[in-house]
Image (tube, rainbow, N blue to C red):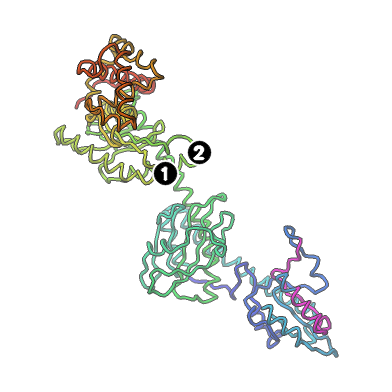
Amino acid sequence: MAHHPATATTADGHLPVGTLLAEPLLRGTLRAGRAGLERGVGWCLPLSETRRYTDEATREPDLTGVAVHLPVTALAAPDEAAAVVADLARRDAAALLAWTPPGADSDLDAAARAADSAGIPLLALPGEADYRTVSRLIGQKALAQSAHILEYGSRVHRTLAEVLARGPGVPAMARAVVGLSRCGVLICDADGERLAWEEAPGAEPADPDAILAALPEDAPDDHPEFTDANAHAAEVRLRLAPDDRPVHALVTPVLVGGQVFGRMVMVEPVCPPDPHDLAQHRVVAEHGATLIGSEMLRQRSVRAAEERARGDFVEALVHGRFADSHELGARARHHGFEVDGHFAVHVVAAASLLPVGRDYLRRTVSATRTAQNLEPGGCALTAAISSTIVVIQRVGAEQDPIRQRADAARFAERLHRALRPQLGDDLRVTHGRPGQGAAGVAAGYHEARLTMGLAWHTAADPVCGYDDLRVFAALKDVARNAEAKSFARETLGPLRRANGGDLERIVLAYIRTSGNLNAAARELGMHRNTMLYKLDRASRALRMDIRSADAQFTFWLAHHIDTLTTVTGTLDEEVAPPAAAPR
């Protein structure tokens, strides 16, 4: 269906001056200023009344959309004519209507030169075209045009609202806009992700990704649609390839409550477009963007509710907080979780996920969705928990434990590569050993969190699993023993009290380099002699020679027990150790 407005309009809905020249009363009256025929006219004022209308912001007279009716006597003297024309042009008057009263002489040569210079149309009106007659004509034309546009807008709104009421989604809204405008329609969200693309019927195929890439990313001065407070469609010319001819498009921001949800791009079938078609498409664009915003808000609300429900289920799953197996089964069926399946749990942590600043929540949601869609069919559930993102990966039940762990390690690497651009270089991904069912998920989460804590303390690789820190896992039960804690405290205490705690770092570097004095000194940026002096002080504090293998093992064991005690103590305050799960 196609309903054209009666005439083309300017961006603000006014009639172009050129359109008024088709009226019998004004036909053939253009004397100068042909370059300004696209100026919009909404109403008419006599010259004596123009100074009453001012812009509150600048206190300058505002004559935008006003055709000024003035007698030719005001333009008689050349100097006076030039001054009047320049003043009215500065105030952005739409046109000058120079009326010659019956019996008066009209010399508009000076005014015509000034009007051509200023680019403002100058019309030489006959005697019968007095102010009352001309103002009535302009008012009737403007009112008729506004009523026609309002009627057409109502039709467009009703058509799109019927699609919205059925709730079929953004692609269906795009198809409805194509049916109204015969333009190609592209809809993207605020991050530039394409939500819908519909080709215009009979048009040459276009690449929607090329259109997205050609759209201005910033907010240039000549593209007002990129400001949050402006919902008007703006005309842009896009060059999709260096050798291709440009395409003409209307770009309209999709605003909801003043917030930019995305953009709607209507690609015209011809460039430049027909003025009547362009006027129609502006109406479609503004109504379409409004209703598409409502649909995007509805979908965002539905998705947010689904993500909250999934997050609640994942949190209950990793902490084992189900009243009984019946509750677990009912919620698992809703979220598509196989109660008897095999799963590996991954924990993602980064400084950008901490609740600091205004954008952390948006980053967390975006990263969670990226993880959820990373591997279709391989990722069961994702959720944000305690400033981390938890990813539950489905692994093959028919595989042996070694292959399951290898699959989990490969998935963790892919997860790290996918999320690093979003979350930064300090991103860490850890995972526990794969397990079966809800108990296996809870055990795997505990192991992944324990591995994360140990990874921060031991400077492990950005991607590591519970098996990669197996030595700590072997000492985990030992570290809970009171005797072991006392041993670690008594061994490390004297070293930490001496020299401000610096000796512990030096001894760790010495052991890490297998007793290579020069390598440890280079790692610490320390002179070799200073390193020897520090090791002698450490030996006296420990009351044993740190160069001996027994002393190094004693210190190494005490340090590992102390690290485990610190990490597990913090973790146990948040997550209770799970019951044993099958592996």
Q: Is residue 74 magenta?
A: yes
Residue 523 % position (x, y): 30, 32
| Residue type at tag 1 | Arg
Q: Is residue 218 magenta?
A: no
Q: Is residue 563 left or right of residue 360?
A: left
Which secondary structure, mark 2? loop
| Residue type at tag 2 | Gly
Residue 489 % position (x, y): 33, 13
Given residues 1 and 583, the one toward you in this image is 583
- Identify the mark nearer the N-term, 2 or 1: 1
Choose mark 2 or mark 1, whichever is in front: 2
Residue 547 % position (x, y): 23, 19
Contact between marks 2 and 1 (CB within 8 A): the answer is: no
Given residues 287 and 42, the one toward you in this image is 42
Given residues 172 and 533, the one toward you in this image is 533
Picture quadrant of residue 319: top left
Outermost residue, right side:
103
Residue located 46% across and 39% down the image:
360
Look at the image and give the residue range highlighted in magenta.
59-87
Q: Is residue 12 left or right of residue 429?
A: right
Per the image, the residue denoted by label 2 is 357
Picture quadrant of residue 76: bottom right
The answer to whether 309 is drawn above or below residue 100 in the figure is above
Per the image, the residue denoted by label 1 is 303
Quadrant including the C terminus: top left
Residue 537 % position (x, y): 33, 17
Given residues 257 and 444, the one toward you in this image is 444
